[in-house]
Image (cartoon, rainbow, N blue to C red):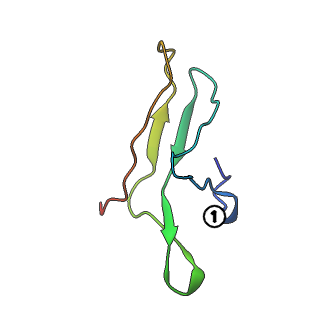
Amino acid sequence: MGGWKPERSLRPGPDGFALSLPVGAVFEYKLLRGGSQGTLDWEDGANRLLFVDEGTGPLRQTLAWSQR
């Protein structure tokens, strides 16, 4: 969603963020967090996957940094 470029990553506000994604698409992503000296650190482990199903309402994801 940021093209694997940390400077283009999504930055949630107090209520998170909203995206419009195509139904049937699969997205790979990782979480980023602020590191030491102003760097951004990628989450360890395999990429996360998100499948956008047809569903009847908004897809809601709760994300948390994990040590994998």
What residue did someone put label 1 on?
Answer: 6
- Label 1: how many residues lie within 10 Å, few (<14), some (14-19) or many (20+)? some
Q: Amino acid at mark 1?
A: Pro
The residue depicted at 52 percent of the width and 26 percent of the height is 52
Q: Position of residue 37 (x, y in %)?
A: 55, 87
- Secondary structure under the numbered disc 1 in the rendered image: helix
Q: Position of residue 28 (x, y in %)?
A: 52, 44
Q: Is residue 9 above or below residue 26?
A: below
The residue depicted at 49 percent of the width and 67 percent of the height is 33
Q: Is residue 59 left or right of residue 24?
A: left
Position of the C terminus, as image quadrant, is: bottom left
The residue positioned farthest toward the bottom in the image shown: 37
The residue positioned farthest toward the top in the image shown: 56
Q: Is residue 60 above or below residue 7?
A: above
Q: Is residue 20 left or right of residue 26?
A: right
Q: Quadrant of residue 49?
A: top left
Q: Position of residue 31 (x, y in %)?
A: 48, 57
Q: Is residue 57 above or below residue 42?
A: above
Q: Is residue 25 above or below residue 65?
A: above
Q: Is residue 24 left or right of residue 3?
A: left
Q: Is residue 1 left or right of residue 14?
A: right
- Total labels: the figure holds 1
Front-most of residues 62 and 21? 62
Q: Position of residue 66 (x, y in %)?
A: 32, 59
